[in-house]
Image (spheres, helix red, strand yellow):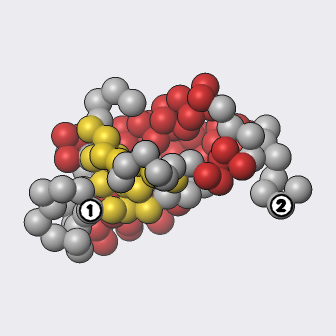
Amino acid sequence: MQYYALHRAGTDNHLVILDLRSRGINGNKTEKLCDHVAISLNKNTVPGDKSAITPSGLRIGAPAMTTRGAKEEDFRKIAQFIHRVVEIGLQVQKQSGPKLKDFLAILDNTPPPELTQLREEVMAFSCGFVPIGQ
């Protein structure tokens, strides 16, 4: 994924950590944004973080999507979705300032229309895959 440093825990798992430090937004805010658009991932610390309370990364696991039949090109699309989430988050952060509670207040009270549009795109994309358990 361009614009981001990636960390991984070896070749024995399907997990990658996306480092957000170069983008100027943290994992807490980005995780909340992803929740709003139906992307399931977790905030995570990255090497060099000063505190686990404000992690700078996102932990992205591939098994749920590979189980549903996602291929390499699908993961490129997912990466684009996540990049768009980060870009929207940077816009919200300009309005809210650095505090998470102010950031969340904007998401809850006046979410940007781009967030709603992205959620619709993510939902349409995910409907093209076999549901887990079927």
Residue found 41% across the figure and 36% down from its top? 83
Residue found 83% across the figure and 61% down from its top? 133
Residue found 59% across the figure and 29% down from its top? 72
Q: Along the line of sight, which residue is nearer the eye, 34 or 14?
A: 14
Numbered tag placed on residue 133 in the rendering = 2
Amino acid type for the residue under numbered disc 2 = Gly
Q: Secondary structure at mark 1?
A: loop
Instruction: Quarter of the image for the C terminus: give it.
Output: bottom right
Amino acid type for the residue under numbered disc 1 = Thr
Q: Which residue is mark 1?
A: 45
Q: Along the line of sight, which residue is nearer the eye, 79 or 24?
A: 79
Across and down, in percent, residue 132 comes to 78, 57
Residue 97 shows in this picture = no
Q: CA distance from mark 1 to mark 2?
A: 31 Å
24 sits to left or right of 77 = left
23 sits to left or right of 132 = left
